[in-house]
Image (cartoon, rainbow, N blue to C red):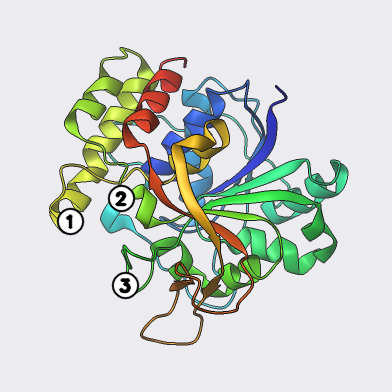
């Protein structure tokens, strides 16, 4: 089996960090070409630093990390320190990263990589707002047909919104960017809240990370200890959704997830529903399907995969 070449576009975030660790622990399936940071959960100065901290935690200083866009395409930045803490990786004490940030802009890295690699060989994995991906598509539209697939975390349908009544955070932060991506024609696989809210960090699952007895296992347990407090209070659930690792898990074991190929459009103008992913789940329109929108996950198998792979690090 040939490992799939991917670029992770991210705004770490504790769950983003777990997704990066899962990718780095899975070299048989995933060849991580680089990480592009974007402003989202916290500002860019922190997301690019956090991405490097995670790479060093995994012993992978060789992974190139690039800083991308520091604000949405047309709007002011909305962040989520109320969930992730002031650093984005609050919880355990973390060292300052020593590996360098690459000098190239993240958008230019996306463009040059997609131009240099064979067409349909690179999968983009956005875990945060879609600003970097959209900016690359606008700046270099010739790369759009070269993308093999985009597998992203974002949106919601049955679970509605987590930042507004109608919108999921990643899409809400930069709906214009999301609209560009969803209209691009690139094959899309979407991990919405409908899936991630079924992948909860229950106490036995967090204890399993801690029981690994490794530094990455301890970090994952402490990160989840920190951020789950917000969601448990908000939803009254027994744990917090582990959103972003669903993207990487799908690349490794796609059978964990089920969904439908449907039309999904992004609301950009309404103050009431800005950032809503209008998913034609029941196929009641004649709009052409543009995304595989996931609706369910085998949560036990998902956490088994996570624990086993994090245990490799």
Q: CA distance from mark 1 to mark 3?
A: 14 Å
How far across and down, in percent of the image, does residue 227 sit?
Answer: 26, 44
- Locate the N terminus and report the quarter of the image it occupies: top right
Q: Residue shown at 30%/22% (left/top)?
A: 209
Q: Is residue 149 visible?
A: yes
How far across and down, in percent of the image, does residue 285 sit?
Answer: 54, 79
Left or right of residue 108, residue 34 in this image: left
* Residue identifier under label 1: 235
Q: Is residue 97 visible?
A: no
How far across and down, in percent of the image, does residue 279 sit?
Answer: 47, 69
User: Label 2's element?
Assistant: loop
Q: Earlier in the sequence, mark 1 or mark 3?
A: 3
Viewer-side residue, 231 vs 54: 231
Q: CA distance from mark 3 to mark 2?
A: 16 Å
Q: Residue shown at 78%/53% (left/top)?
A: 111
User: Label 3's element?
Assistant: loop
Q: CA distance from mark 1 to mark 2?
A: 10 Å
- Quarter residue 162 falls in: bottom left
Q: Earlier in the sequence, mark 1 or mark 2?
A: 2
Q: Residue shown at 34%/59% (left/top)?
A: 80
């Amino acid at each position: 089996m040939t490992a799939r070449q991917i670029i992770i576009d991210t705004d770490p975030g504790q769950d983003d960090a777990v997704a990066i660790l899962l990718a780095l622990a899975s070299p048989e399936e995933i060849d991580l070409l680089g990480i592009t940071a974007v402003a989202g959960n916290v500002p860019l100065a922190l997301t690019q630093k956090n991405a490097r901290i995670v790479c060093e935690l995994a012993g992978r200083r060789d992974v190139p990390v690039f800083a991308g866009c520091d604000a949405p395409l047309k709007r002011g930045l909305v962040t989520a320190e109320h969930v992730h803490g002031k650093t984005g990786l609050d919880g355990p004490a973390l060292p300052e990263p020593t590996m360098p940030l690459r000098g190239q802009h993240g958008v230019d890295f996306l463009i040059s990589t997609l131009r240099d690699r064979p067409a349909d060989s690179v999968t983009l994995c956005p875990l945060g707002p879609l600003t970097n991906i959209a900016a690359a598509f606008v700046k270099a539209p010739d790369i759009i047909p070269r993308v093999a697939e985009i597998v992203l975390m974002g949106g919601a349908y049955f679970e509605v919104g987590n930042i507004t009544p109608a919108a999921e955070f990643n899409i809400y932060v930069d709906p214009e960017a999301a609209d560009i991506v969803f209209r691009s024609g690139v094959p899309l696989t979407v991990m919405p809240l409908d899936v991630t809210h079924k992948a909860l960090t229950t106490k036995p699952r967090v204890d399993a990370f801690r029981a690994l007895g490794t530094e990455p296992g301890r970090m994952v347990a402490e990160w989840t200890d920190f951020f789950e407090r917000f969601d448990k209070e908000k939803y009254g659930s027994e744990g917090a959704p582990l959103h972003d690792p669903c993207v990487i898990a799908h690349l490794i074991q796609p059978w964990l997830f089920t969904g439908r190929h449907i039309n999904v459009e992004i609301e950009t103008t309404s103050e009431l529903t800005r950032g809503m992913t209008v998913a034609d789940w029941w196929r009641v329109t004649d709009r052409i399907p543009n995304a595989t929108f996931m609706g369910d996950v085998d949560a036990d198998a998902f956490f088994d995969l996570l624990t086993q792979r994090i245990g490799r690090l």
